[in-house]
């Protein structure tokens, strides 16, 4: 794994950088981005990580990341399918190859980047201090490296002094300190430091808990920060101190957390623990490591995904504050510790960060089972939500089958008299025209429009309850989309909407019902046009076709985007639900029908990606095993067939 040799690409470090940052590997791949970048850019992590840097910054070539020299220059980057933005980029290289692409804060999404010289003047000292600290902690082996690391630490966080104590036997010894440090004790007994948390900031107005704080009080120091340096989550190797004159501001406190993570990386074993951590990240179960005080010291990626907390957010927190549920784990932890045996909890329920319940099976293993000298626990959490989902889904299918029968009967019973009513109103309207009565004509027109709307609702109900099973055959989705777009061009032109089209060449074929898939894309394009009705200025709809792979399966993905106002977060989860619509004249079945059709084709139609300034719907359909160009040569005859148009006025 790349993270074994590139620790600067780990989230524990990136998350403490106060600017939007992309960690880029030696081959130009984006290994990881921090949360600040995600908030600033509008991307989500799955959209950006493991992609080539050139996809996001088309102006950059290999010479940009394959260099040992830092640089700063204006960049142009693709914000989404329809927008581009100008930013200022700063490159921070690392010795192993690759580095950080830093995007300094511009006070929001500014249209123009600041002057290059201003960016360099603002960030150069910080970047240089970071490089010095990194070299001293990882590369330097001479006797002065600790002093260089401490000097770089004080420069980075704008502190007054710094000192390092390392363990020798049962005592902490003063290993190095900067020149401005007060007269510090040469040794610190372990018991004198028991009041300290893992990391903390002390104010001179508070009682002095340790000899370091008492010595600092005799000088101009007003605040002292410390962090324990741990070789693994349950063993201390030393402690780092930094003194300040004045309360550290918000940026200094963020940089202190970054400093702590850089120092911690130095004291972790280079291979064994890193490899163990990497293996845990591949575990299908959530793994949580707790110390003797039930504080979280380990949190793998599965735990991040299940509970929606990053590892950096939970480190050092009490487990009861994160693993929340109707019952606390405290009693079970005590029982496992007392019995010295693993404890299994079936049918356990946690509540995730977003408030959703998480049914699971929990296994608590006391550390003493693994090492008699270490106290603490390892908690394994197996997600049972999928099994619960299947159980509930099976129950819903039974209910839906019953409702489908009722809807079918209802629609058939209503449609026939509705047709008669519609024909009768038309006849009355024709006779009323001879009377030349405006009120008569207006009333009849309203009745006519109502019957048309009821008729459309009945058709949508039938399509939703009993979708037609058409013949599935080999299709080229790009050709199908061109047919749909050609028919909808007059409507696009009438609404002054510009269509931007990009399609990958030689797309694989899919197996599908042509007319059903036409309805999907007509519904999505209609939905995009309706989103742009009140959009001032230019209006765009983007169409993108490409082949993509997911879980070993090749798919053809169609992305339809617009530059409308986006979907409010509070309704995003409801848009595929039947009868949900934000339009007074909508049936609320257009997107539900499209979602059902895609699912029937064994495809995926996830919730749309939405942000201020646009929405992206994606449809992924499984590609056929054979995707040769020869097969496509047999398809033109298929596209020459006359095709009945699906309901192009279907609304969401």
Image: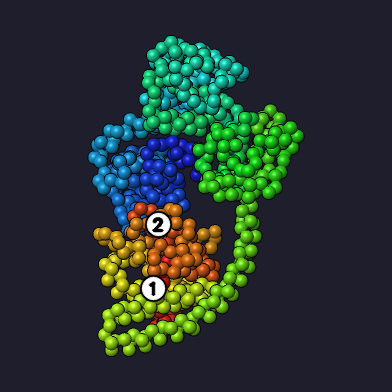
Mark 1 residue crowding within 10 angstroms, few (<14) / some (14–19) / many (20+): some
Q: Which mark is residue 487?
A: none
Is residue 146 visible in the rendered image? The answer is no
Secondary structure, mark 1, is loop
Q: Nearer the viewer, residue 62 or 453?
A: 453
Image spot of residue 643 (x, y percent): 41, 82
For the C terminus, the image quarter is bottom left
User: Is 366 on the left or on the right of 209, as rendered?
Assistant: right
Q: Nearer the viewer, residue 300 or 272?
A: 300
Mark 2 residue crowding within 10 angstroms, few (<14) / some (14–19) / many (20+): some
Secondary structure, mark 2, is loop
Rendered view: 208 above or below 492: above
**Mark 2 vs mark 1: which is more N-terminal?**
2
Query: Disc 2 designates what residue?
Result: 567
Q: Quadrant of residue 421?
A: bottom left
Q: Residue furthest right?
A: 339
Query: Disc 1 designates what residue?
Result: 649
Q: Nearer the viewer, residue 31 or 12?
A: 12
Residue at figure coordinates x 72%, y 36% from the top left: 336
Residue at figure coordinates x 69%, y 36% from the top left: 331
Snapshot colouring: rainbow
Image spot of residue 532 (x, y percent): 32, 63
Residue at figure coordinates x 55%, y 34% from the top left: 317
Image spot of residue 151 (x, y percent): 40, 23
Is residue 454 visible in the rendered image? The answer is yes
Q: Quadrant of residue 178?
A: top left
């Amino acid at each position: 794994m790349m993270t074994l040799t590139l620790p600067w690409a780990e989230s524990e470090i990136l998350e403490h950088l106060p600017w939007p940052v992309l960690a880029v590997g030696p081959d130009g791949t984006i290994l990881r981005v921090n949360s600040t970048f995600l908030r600033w850019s509008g991307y989500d992590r799955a959209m950006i990580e493991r992609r080539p840097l050139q996809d996001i910054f088309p102006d950059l070539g290999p010479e940009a990341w394959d260099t040992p020299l830092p640089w700063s220059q204006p960049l142009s980057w693709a914000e989404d399918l329809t927008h581009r933005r100008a930013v200022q980029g700063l490159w921070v290289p690392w010795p192993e190859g690759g580095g950080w692409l830093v995007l300094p804060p511009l006070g929001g999404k500014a249209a123009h980047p600041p002057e290059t010289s201003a960016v360099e003047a603002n960030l150069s000292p910080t970047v240089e201090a970071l490089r010095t600290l990194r070299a001293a902690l990882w590369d330097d082996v001479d006797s002065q490296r600790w002093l260089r690391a401490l000097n770089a630490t004080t420069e980075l966080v704008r502190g007054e002094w710094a000192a390092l104590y390392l363990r020798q036997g049962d005592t902490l010894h003063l290993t190095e300190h900067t020149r401005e440090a007060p007269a510090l004790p040469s040794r610190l007994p372990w018991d004198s430091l028991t009041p300290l948390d893992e990391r903390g900031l002390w104010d001179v107005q508070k009682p002095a808990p340790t000899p370091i704080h008492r010595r600092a009080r005799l000088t101009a120091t007003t605040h002292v920060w410390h962090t324990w340096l741990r070789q693994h989550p349950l063993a201390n190797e030393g402690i780092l101190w930094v003194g300040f004159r004045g309360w550290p501001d918000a940026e200094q406190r963020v940089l202190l957390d970054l400093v702590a993570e850089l120092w911690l990386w130095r004291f972790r074993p280079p291979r064994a623990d890193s490899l163990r951590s990497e293996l845990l990240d591949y575990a299908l179960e959530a793994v949580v490591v707790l110390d003797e005080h039930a504080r979280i010291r380990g949190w793998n990626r599965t735990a991040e995904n299940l509970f929606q907390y990053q590892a950096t957010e939970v480190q050092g927190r009490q487990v009861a504050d994160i693993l929340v549920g109707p019952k606390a784990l405290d009693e079970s932890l005590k029982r496992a510790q007392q019995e010295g045996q693993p404890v299994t909890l079936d049918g356990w329920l946690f509540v995730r960060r977003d408030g959703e319940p998480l049914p699971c099976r929990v296994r608590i293993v006391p550390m003493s089972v693994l090492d008699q000298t270490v106290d603490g626990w390892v908690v394994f959490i197996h997600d049972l939500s999928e099994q619960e989902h299947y159980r509930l889904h099976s129950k819903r299918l039974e209910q839906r089958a019953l409702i489908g029968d009722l809807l079918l009967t209802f629609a058939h019973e209503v449609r026939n008299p509705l047709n008669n009513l519609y024909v009768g109103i038309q006849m009355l309207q024709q006779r009323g025209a001879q009377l030349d009565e405006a009120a008569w004509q207006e009333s009849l027109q309203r009745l006519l429009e109502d019957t048309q709307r009821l008729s459309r609702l009945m058709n949508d109900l039938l399509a939703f309850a009993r979708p037609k099973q058409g013949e599935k055959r080999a299709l080229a989705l790009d050709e199908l989309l061109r047919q749909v777009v050609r028919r909808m061009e007059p409507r696009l032109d009438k609404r002054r909407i510009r269509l931007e089209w990009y399609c990958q060449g030689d797309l694989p074929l899919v197996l599908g019902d042509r007319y059903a898939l036409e309805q999907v894309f007509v519904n999505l394009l209609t939905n995009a046009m309706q989103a742009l009705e009140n959009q001032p200025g230019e209006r765009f709809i983007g169409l993108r076709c490409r082949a993509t792979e997911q879980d070993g399966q090749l798919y053809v993905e169609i992305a339809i985007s617009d530059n409308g106002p986006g979907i409010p977060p509070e309704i995003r989860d409801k848009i595929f639900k039947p009868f949900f619509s934000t339009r007074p004249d909508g049936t609320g079945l257009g997107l539900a029908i499209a979602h059902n059709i895609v699912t029937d084709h064994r495809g995926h139609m996830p919730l749309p990606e939405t942000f201020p300034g646009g929405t992206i719907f994606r449809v992924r359909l499984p590609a056929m095993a054979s995707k040769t160009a020869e097969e496509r040569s047999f398809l033109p005859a298929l596209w020459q067939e006359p095709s009945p148009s699906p309901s192009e006025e279907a609304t969401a």
